[in-house]
Amino acid sequence: MSVSYRQPGVVLTDRRFTVPLDHANPSGETIELYAREAVASDRTGQNLPWLVYLQGGPGFGANRFIGRPAWLGRALKDYRVLLLDQRGTGASTPANRQTLPLRGGPAEQAGYLAHFRADGIVRDCEAIRPQVTGGAPWTVLGQSFGGFCTVAYLSLAPEGLSTALITGGLPSLDAHADDVYRAAYPRIERKVVAHYARYPQDVERARRIADHLLTHDVVLPNGYRLTVEAFQSLGILLGGGEGSHRLHFLLEDAFVRTPRGHELSDAFQEQVQGLLSYAGHPLYALVHEAIYGQDARPTDWSAERVRAEFPRFDAAKALSGDEPLLFTGESVHPWMFDCDPALRPLRETAELLAARTDWTPLYDPARLAANEVPAAAAVYHDDMYVDTGHALTTARAIRGLRTWVTDEFEHDGVRAGGPRVLDRLLALARDEA
């Protein structure tokens, strides 16, 4: 039963749907999807077109907005909005260390999780669309991984779309995970160099913290083992508009003097565990590299293997000389399943997914080349998370897709400049800009 309630300027309705786990076997096992419908409080009785929002990730539920912030306020001028918790995320049937053992052992868990990629998400959208819109096509807004899903939507079920809008999420159509990370590490290094140019004092601060972690066994309050590699992964912050400033404030008061000498402060450790823990989004770690699997080649811990090709990211080597410590970015590594208590029970499951060789294609180049759905994409110049070169190559491969390439925003531009970003994309898709 749907439940509706009000927030400032908006009426929200909780909606739940049942869909097949495997859409190729519609009479088999089912899972539940949760979505939150949002409509402007002064337009509740109007027959509005629908926009479905696909969150970035993988592994994150849709935004829990309060009122009409960011892009949502702009969208509610024209649409009813469906904020979908993609399968396995948010309030949809969860997939985590607590629930996955219900599937059986690691092999059964890995087989289950193989259904949690973009193609499954697109089929979910098509399964629920008739219940939501009465069968009418809808607009999709895909942020980051949600954009990957949108390109898959254009490949698998374009008849379900009236418009496709993508922010920071045009994937390569054919790159292996190794290609993705070979492009990523130089881009990440540029972001770190830019951070140190803005905050030169952070060079010594980061080196001091890394040196402490190389010589001390630090376990955070939640049981997370803070290694130097884990500390380096805080560079994921540098892909957001405020990320460099957030990293700077995190580093500035890392140590406190104690009777045993200088130690990492409780306040620093508390913040770090919140940034590093995958307890709230374990699917990100489990299927992150699987989103690039499209052929018989395993992903095989691609980010870890490719990192070895970039020795400047080696903390011990940097500290043995006078080089700055390089942070890393959006990547998943096998050591995370040793460090993070939310992931430790899933290590063998993750190994099986990394070794999998039967991934099916997610995108259809021929269908994209014949696309007829109005489409527009925001491409962020030197985006740390999604390679700009890959994105623009894909943009050229999708017939009629119009791009807005900008350095005004980082990867989270739809949050930071939501109304303007959405306005621009809608104008491009409608051929008004």
Image (tube, rainbow, N blue to C red):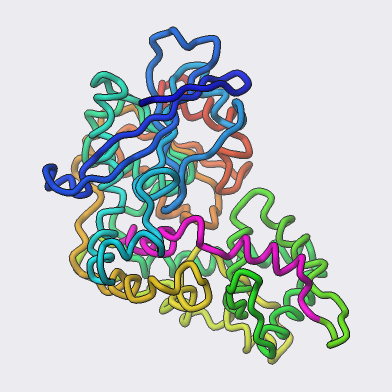
Q: Is residue 196 toward the left or the right of residue 286 in the image?
A: right
Q: Is residue 270 magenta?
A: yes
* Residue occupying image coordinates x 51% and y 56%: 280
* Residue occupying image coordinates x 55% and y 48%: 411
* Residue occupying image coordinates x 43% and y 59%: 284
**Magenta stretch: dominant SS?**
helix
In the rendered view, would you say 42 is above or below 238? above
In the rendered view, would you say 366 is above or below 205? above
**Where is residue 159, by image quadrant?**
top left
In the rendered view, would you say 63 is above or below 358? above
The tally of labels here is 0
Q: Is residue 157 magenta?
A: no
Q: Is residue 145 toward the left or the right of residue 17 in the image?
A: right
Q: Is residue 319 toward the left or the right of residue 48 in the image?
A: right
Q: Position of residue 179 (x, y in %)?
A: 37, 67
Looking at this view, is 363 or 149 the one in front?
Answer: 149
* Residue occupying image coordinates x 37% and y 47%: 148
In the rendered view, would you say 276 is above or below 348? above
The N terminus - image quarter: top left
Q: Position of residue 426 (x, y in %)?
A: 46, 25
Q: Is residue 138 visible?
A: yes
**Where is residue 174, by image quadrant?**
bottom left
Range covered by the magenta-colored residues: 263-292
Q: Is residue 368 visible?
A: no
Q: Position of residue 219 (x, y in %)?
A: 63, 78
Q: Position of residue 116 (x, y in %)?
A: 30, 53
Looking at this view, is 132 or 318 the one in front?
Answer: 132
Q: In the displayed image of the protein, which residue is found farthest to the top?
A: 45
